[in-house]
Amino acid sequence: MPDNYKKLLGIPGTMSRDTTVFWMNFDAYAILIRIKLVNKKTEDLFFVFSKYHEILRELKGFRNTQELIDFVREYFSKSIDMPIELDYHCIEKNSSVKHVSCFQESGDDIAHPESGDKFCVSSLIELDSFCYIASDLVYPEYLDENISRKIVGSLSKNLNEDQTSKVSIVFSEMFNNALDHGVLGIPSVLKDNTSGFEEFINARRSALAVSQDGVISIEVKLNFLKESELPTAVFLSVMDNGGGLVELDRSLSEADRKKYHGRGLKLIQHLSKEIGVDELGKRIYVVL
Amino acid sequence: MTISAVKKGDELTIQIEGRFDFYCLQDFRKIYEENGKCGTYVLDMAKTDFLDSSALGMLLTLRDYAGGDSAKITIVNASDDIKKIISVTKLDELFKVM
C-alpha cells in the first residue's frame, strides 16, 4: 500500500459488529463502546449504524469519558425500542497502546463474530482529525439486491450531492464486482449476448438463494478537516474472499466498446482520484 | 424505477425514471420489443437519477436490436453526471447525446 494510503487510513481500530471506537483527546486516548442487541436482526443493526452516525454529529463538546458514555447510553436507550446492554473499555491517554484490540476482533481481521452473528457493523471515530471509519462485513445471508443502496444511503448523510453521486456509482460497481465475480463466481462473459444478460440475473438470483461461503468486507473512511462540514476525501475499500481480479489498466478497445459489459472498472477509475488493488486482487480501494 | 414509452410514427421515446440499473433489464427489453423495430429511438433521461455499468450494457442491447451501427438512438435530458458516465465509457461515439 502506498504511503499516502497509510496516512488516509489512519490508526487501525477495532472493528466489530456492535462496537464503536471513540478516539479521544481528553482524559482517555480511546474509548470502545459496545452496544449489545438482544435481537440481532439486520434492520436493527442498520439502525444502530445510523445511530452512530447521529452521535458522530453531536460529538463535539464532551469534556470527559463519563460524559460521552452517559450521552451514548441515553441516546440508545431513548431511540431503541428494545433492551440493550452497554459496556466500554478505556485506553488511558498515556498508554503506549495504539492498536486497540479488545472485544474479540481487531484490525482488518474478518473472522466470524461469535454466537452466530452474521453481520458486522461498527464505526471508528477519531476526534483529533475528525475522521470516521465504518467497516462492515456482509455475510451471504444478507447479500441482497439492496445492500449496496442501503450502505450508500447511510453514508450520504455526510456528503454533498456531487460526492453522493460519485460514491453511489463507484461503490455499487465495486460491490457488484465483489458479489458477482468474487462471492458468486458468475463470469461476465455470460453478458456477451442479449439473452445472456437475463441468464446473468437469473444466475445471480439463484446463487443468492442458496448458501454461499463468501464474505464481503467493506471499509469506508471520510476525512474531515477540523470544523469542516463535508469530508475532503472519501476512502472506500471492498474486499471479497473469491478468486480475485483485476486488470486495472484495461482500456476499452474499439471492439470492447460495443460489448455489453466491462465498463465498471473504467467508471471507478474515472471517478476516483486514486485506485488500487491488493496483490491477490481481492481488495480494491479508491479515494474519491 | 419506471420505464415507459410513447410511440409517434416511427419514433419510440423511452422514459426511464429513477434508478437505471441491472434490475431494469427485463422491463427495458420488454418495452422496446413490444413496440417492434422503429426508425429512431429517443431515450429520455430527465428523470433518471442513477445509471450503472449494467445500464450501459442495456443501452447497447437496444442499439443492437435497432440495427447496430445503423441504429438511430438519441439520449436526451441526461444530467451532467450521466453525460459524464456516457463519455467516459466512450458510448458517446455510439449514441447521440443531446
Image (tube, rainbow, N blue to C red):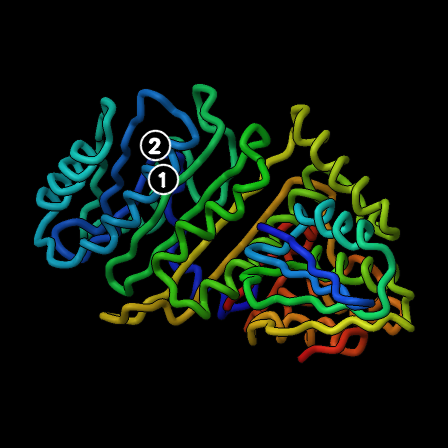
Residue pictured at 69% horizontal, 60% vertical: B6
Tell whether B26 sits left or right of A114. Answer: right
Expressed as whole percent of the image width and height from the top left, the position of residue A288 reads: 50, 68
Residue annotated with mark 2? A103
Q: Nearer the viewer, residue B44 or A30?
A: B44
User: Is residue A264 at all visible to an observer of this figure?
Assistant: no
Q: Is residue B73 above or below residue A195?
A: below
User: Is residue B72 at all visible to an observer of this figure?
Assistant: yes
Q: Residue furthest front?
A: B9
Expressed as whole percent of the image width and height from the top left, the position of residue B9 reads: 80, 67
Residue pictured at 49% horizontal, 28% vertical: A118
Q: Is residue A251 above or below residue A197?
A: below
Tell whether B51 sits left or right of A64. Answer: right
Expressed as whole percent of the image width and height from the top left, the position of residue B97 reads: 70, 77
* The image quarter in which residue A222 lies: bottom left
Tell whether A54 sits left or right of A250. Answer: left
Expressed as whole percent of the image width and height from the top left, the position of residue B61 reads: 82, 58
Q: Nearer the viewer, residue A116 or B74?
A: B74
Q: Viewer-nearest of labels 2 and 1?
A: 2
Q: Is residue B70 above or below residue A235?
A: below
Residue type at tag 2: Phe
Residue pictured at 16% horizontal, 35% vertical: A73
Residue type at tag 1: Ser
Q: Secondary structure at mark 1?
A: loop
Residue annotated with mark 1? A101
Q: Nearer the viewer, residue B49 or A253?
A: B49
> The disc numbered 1 marks a residue on which chain?
A
Q: Nearer the viewer, residue B75 or A72?
A: B75
* The image quarter in which residue A43 lies: top left
Cα distance between the residues tagged 2 and 1: 7 Å
* Local crowd size for mark 1, using a 10 Å CA cut-off: few (<14), some (14–19), many (≥20): some
